[in-house]
Image (cartoon, rainbow, N blue to C red):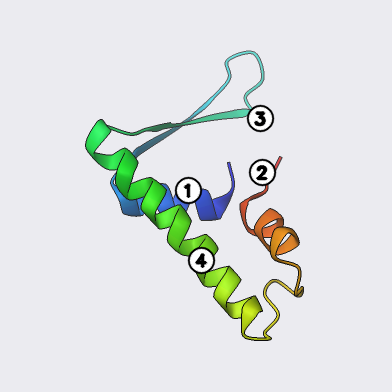
Amino acid sequence: MNERIRELARRSGAHISIRNLASNPVQRIESVELCDDKIEKFAKLIVEECAGIYCSIDNGNLHMGTDDYLEALHKIFRSEE
């Protein structure tokens, strides 16, 4: 799971659990549990993150080293795997 998504999930009040697979202790399984009242908060945080990136680029600034909005989003939210 991407660190930024992890951070937004934590801020929304989600419970994040991480465990290793018994068959391969190096592999980790991460899960996020969101109650109904936390889903809206998590979605709002993601939208705010996207809007902030768009505003930054729209004002002529680079974000994550690019002025391409979709590329910046991909860099922020892509999986670390």
| Residue 34 image offset from top left, x and y in percent | 33, 34
Residue under pointer 1: 6
**Residue visible at 49% across and 63% down in the picture:** 49
Name the kind of residue labelled 1 in the image.
Arg
Label 3: few (<14), some (14–19) or many (≥20) C-alpha neighbours in 10 Å? few
Q: Secondary structure at mark 3?
A: loop
Residue sitting at x 37%, y 47%: 42
Query: In the image, is residue 11 above or below residue 66?
Result: above
Judged by depth in the image, the label closer to the viewer, 3 or 1, is: 1
Which residue sits furthest bottom? Answer: 60
Q: Are marks 2 and 4 in contact (CB under 8 Å)?
A: no
Q: Looking at the image, is 57 positioned above or below residue 7?
A: below
Q: What distance separates the C-alpha of mark 4 from that of mark 1?
A: 18 Å
Residue 23 image position (x, y, % from top left)? 64, 13
Q: Which residue is mark 4?
A: 51
Badge number at residue 79? 2
Quadrant of the frame with the N terminus: top right
Alpha-carbon span between mark 1 and mark 2? 11 Å
The mark nearer the N terminus, 3 or 1, is 1
- Residue 73 marker: none
Say few, some or many: other residues with alpha carbon within 10 Å of mark 2 (under 14 / 14 to 19 / 20 or more): few
Give the residue pinned by disc 3. 26
